[in-house]
Amino acid sequence: MSIPTVVTLQPQAVAVATKPRWQTGLMDCFTDWNVCCCGLFCFPCLACEVAGDMSECCLCGTSVALRTLYRTRYNIPGSICSDHCITCCCPVCSVCQIKRDIKRRIAMGIF
């Protein structure tokens, strides 16, 4: 007579942790027309608004430091070098991306 095998451990679903990332891409300007238009036609206003959202000085709105601060605050992968390149090559896209990300994080309740 054989003894039946009893399974005591069942397979469990494993949650895969994803790395935090930007809510939208750098060139995803058309996902939020208001931010896009503000960035194109009144860039200094948008930069001051982003700096204000982060409780920083209005003059810091387009800086590498602000982008790096935001990225590190939300553990978004990247480097100061990439922040510098993005901010210097396309400051409007950089500030628009941060503003879109802020708006989405506010909507999710994590800003």
Image (spheres, rainbow, N blue to C red):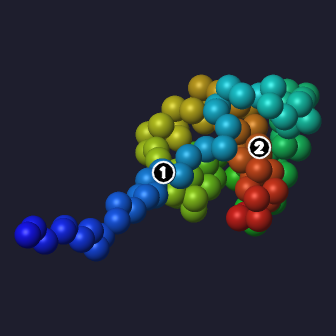
Query: In the rendering, at what x and y percent does residue 53 appear?
Result: 79, 60
Q: Is residue 30 above or below residue 19?
A: above
**Which residue is rendered at x = 80% and y = 51% of the image?**
103
Query: In the rendering, at what x and y percent does residue 93 appear?
Result: 70, 31
Badge 2 marks a residue whose secondary structure is helix
Q: Residue 44's quadrant in the figure?
A: top right
Asked whether residue 56 is in view, the answer is: no
Query: In the rendering, at what x and y percent does residue 98 appear?
Result: 70, 45
Q: In the drawing, does residue 10 fall left or right of residue 110?
A: left
**Which residue is rendered at x = 89% and y = 31% of the image?**
33
Q: In the drawing, does residue 17 fall left or right of residue 40?
A: left
Q: Is residue 23 above or below residue 55?
A: above
Asked whether residue 29 is in view, the answer is: yes
Q: Which mark is residue 100?
A: 2
Q: Is residue 68 above or below residue 24?
A: below
Name the one closer to the observer, 84 or 97: 97
Mark 2–mark 1 contact, CB under 8 Å?
no
Q: Amino acid at mark 1?
A: Thr
Q: Amino acid at mark 2?
A: Arg
Image quarter of the C terminus: bottom right
Q: Mark 2 Cα within 10 Å, few/some/many (few <14, many 20+)?
A: many
Q: Residue 32's quadrant in the figure?
A: top right
Query: In the rendering, at what x and y percent does residue 76 appear?
Result: 52, 51
Image quarter of the N terminus: bottom left
Question: Looking at the image, how many numbered discs can be counted on the residues?
Answer: 2
- Residue, disc 1: 18
Name the one closer to the observer, 101 or 8: 8
Name the one closer to the observer, 8 or 50: 8
**Which residue is rendered at x = 24% and y = 71% of the image?**
6
Q: In the drawing, does residue 11 fall left or right of residue 4?
A: right
Badge 2 or badge 1: first in the primary sequence: 1
